[in-house]
Amino acid sequence: MYPGSLVPRFLRTSNQFLPKLWTSLSQSLIPYKTFPLATFERRISIAVMSTSSPPTPPSRALIDDEQRFKTITLPCEWVEDYRPGGYHPVVLGDVLNHQYKVIRKLGEGSYSTVWLAHDLNNSRYVALKILVSEISESTTELRILRHIVEYAPEEGSRYITRLLDEFEHRGPNGLHKCLVLEPMGPSVNTMVEELPQFKPRRRGMKIRYPLQMAKSILKQSLQALAFLHENGIAHGDFQPGNILFPLIDVDSTPEELLLQEEDVQARSISPPVQRLDGKQDKWAPQYLCVAQPLVPFTCYAEGFKVKLSDMGGAYFFTDPPTKPVTPLGLRAPELILTGAVNNTVDIWSFGCLIFELITGQPLFCVPCSEMEDDDHLLSLTAQLGALPDELFRHWTTSSLYFTPERKLFNSQLGGVAPGEEPLIVEQTSMEECFDRAGPDLDEEEANKVKALIRWILQYDPGKRPSPTKILSDPWFCEIDVEDDPSKVSIV
């Protein structure tokens, strides 16, 4: 949904991109020699093709000619990131910290993988998030989660995925911080496609949440933002992929019903990871797992709850980051043009989310490219109006699109090529885009929502309303969020 947010830390091959899901584990304590490749219980050996040891891979971004592995095309993390400083290699069945047995992969991100694990000491299931080694010492995620547990445990547990335990784990790629969190279901980003009304998928079908679901998601996520901001914390990566649905009594489910199959033909795992030089690699796992969120155990009916997750991009207001991780299409204009990080970056993202959940379309769809900033800024000026002078003067490539009088003469990214004519595209306001999407609102309510989005998406950060103030808006006051979720799941 946000192409820029799905791109890994550095450019991947065309079929190796990394999705931003709920996301972040393991050490192979058991040196498996075989694993099944099909459901009929056939097992093959992972042969060691060379007796000589390969060189240690570099602990930095990969250069093109340094690729170690044969390409894996399944939607998994990039296999080349299994290197010193990178991911910890995990296979199903690993037991971490003598307590947590890995049984299923839930997701992955640029800086972590997340696994469903059986807590053998407490007879419960947990989500294990293991951070890449290179950020394990510098991340503020654990510090913020600890702060929430210490100062607002009850209120925090209502809005933020709970931290249950933490430990460090040393593996071939370094020392990894491991977070033990409450297990959750799919994200708002993906759950919409699992709703029964969209199966089977038909041509022309609008895939978006029913209006009351969208409203409830918006209000609950705004309440979560209000909680964080009242405690001096910004989420920093506020997006549908980090808003999660709850599970229904998963602890009473037998492990065999949750266990991910080691089945290549079913595409639940990849074929064996193989080096190009035929040597055995000690830094990567034997295979990669495809994420399998717990859709069948997800509560989504009336009265459902959602929580904010993945505090990997969060920060205290008093200590903003120099490089925030906000997805491309959700970045505030001052962040694009000056790199300024303030207390309202979440607010801008939330304004974009209102548009998206009500219409089913992102407000700003910005593909990752060399001209992504220009692409985004042109969309901003088209849909929200001209940038104020103090921002526009930071747009160093604006002369490719605007005259000295700031009149738009070209919409072609990168400027007008020699011998070509300028490209002018229709300038469509946010309100017109909203109406064209045909949301399930009457005219009066549609006007309220459009005015609300305008109020939030102000170019001046000082004029953007706080989460608490947005919650007091009449449109949000009318949204009823029930206290007790209905015990309905997708079966």
Image: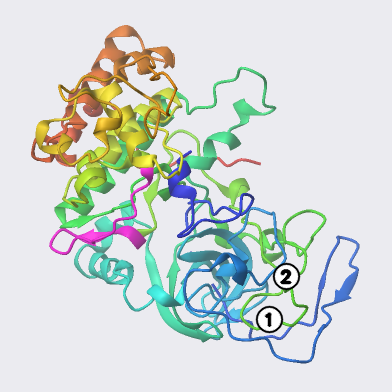
Depth order, front residue of 112/229 = 112
- Write the residue at 50% across / 35% down: 301
Is there any visible trace of residue 255 in the rendered image?
yes
Query: What x and y, as percent, mark residue 102?
Result: 61, 72
Q: Label 2, on which residue?
A: 273
**In the current view of this chain or complex, which residue is farthest to the top?**
443
Q: Is residue 42 magenta?
A: no
- Write the residue at 38% across / 35% down: 414
Query: What x and y, as percent, mark residue 317?
Result: 15, 58
- Check the image and report above or below for 446 versus 240: above
Q: Label 1, on which residue?
A: 281
Range covered by the magenta-colored residues: 312-328
- Write the residue at 16% across / 50% down: 343
> Considering the numbered disc 2 on the image, is that residue within a helix, a strand or a loop?
loop
The answer to whether the residues at label 1 and label 2 have Cβ atoms under 8 Å apart is yes
Quarter of the C terminus within the rendering: top right
Is there any visible trace of residue 481 in the rendered image?
no
